[in-house]
Image: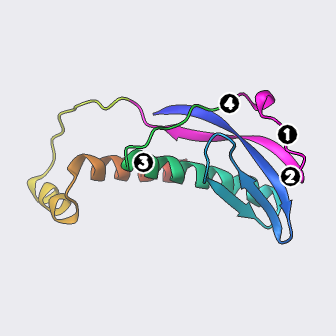
Amino acid sequence: MAIAYYPAIIERAPDGYGVFFPDVPGCTSHGSTLQQAARNAEVALNGHIKVSVEYGDEIPAPSDLDAVARDPDVDEAARILVRADLPGKQRRINVTMDEGLLAAIDRASTNRSGFLAEGARMLLAARG
């Protein structure tokens, strides 16, 4: 997985803070506090990228934070960089496992590789 950092604008909203990404139209987030908005931004961005990959959409390259123009109509609270895990090149591997476990995977999913990759991501995230 490749890592990229996307600029995000946090703006004041009546009920907290909204977040949007100039490079990723349609990707927004929110939080009742500035800190919560910043944390939710990473979840939103990575979810947006994951869905884009599933649909075969192009992932835009991130702009330089200093290059993002200011909009006078936006009540900015902060500008931040948000970490995103970008998909890397697919590699074919050979895996050995118990046939019962393999059968259970096949019953749970129509895509073994995707199922195993998602399980690996979840386990890695839980281990921090």
Lower position in the chain sequence, tag 4 or tag 1: 4
Lower position in the chain sequence, tag 1 or tag 3: 1
Rendered location of residue 41, percent (x, y): 67, 53
- Give the Cα separation between the discs numbered 3 and 2: 36 Å
Q: Which range is magenta?
A: 64-88
Say if mark 1 contacts mark 2, CB within 8 Å.
yes
Q: State which mark lies toward you, 4 or 1.
A: 1
Name which residue lies at 63% across and 50% down: 42
Q: State which mark lies toward you, 4 or 3.
A: 4
Circle 2 — which element? loop
Rendered location of residue 88, percent (x, y): 41, 31
Say if mark 1 contacts mark 3, CB within 8 Å.
no
- Give the Cα separation between the discs numbered 4 and 1: 14 Å
Which amino acid, by three-letter code, is at mark 3? Arg
Lower position in the chain sequence, tag 4 or tag 3: 4
Which amino acid, by three-letter code, is at mark 2? Val
- Give the Cα separation between the discs numbered 1 and 2: 8 Å
- Give the Cα separation between the discs numbered 1 and 3: 36 Å
Residue receiving disc 2: 74
Which amino acid, by three-letter code, is at mark 4? Ser
Residue receiving disc 1: 70
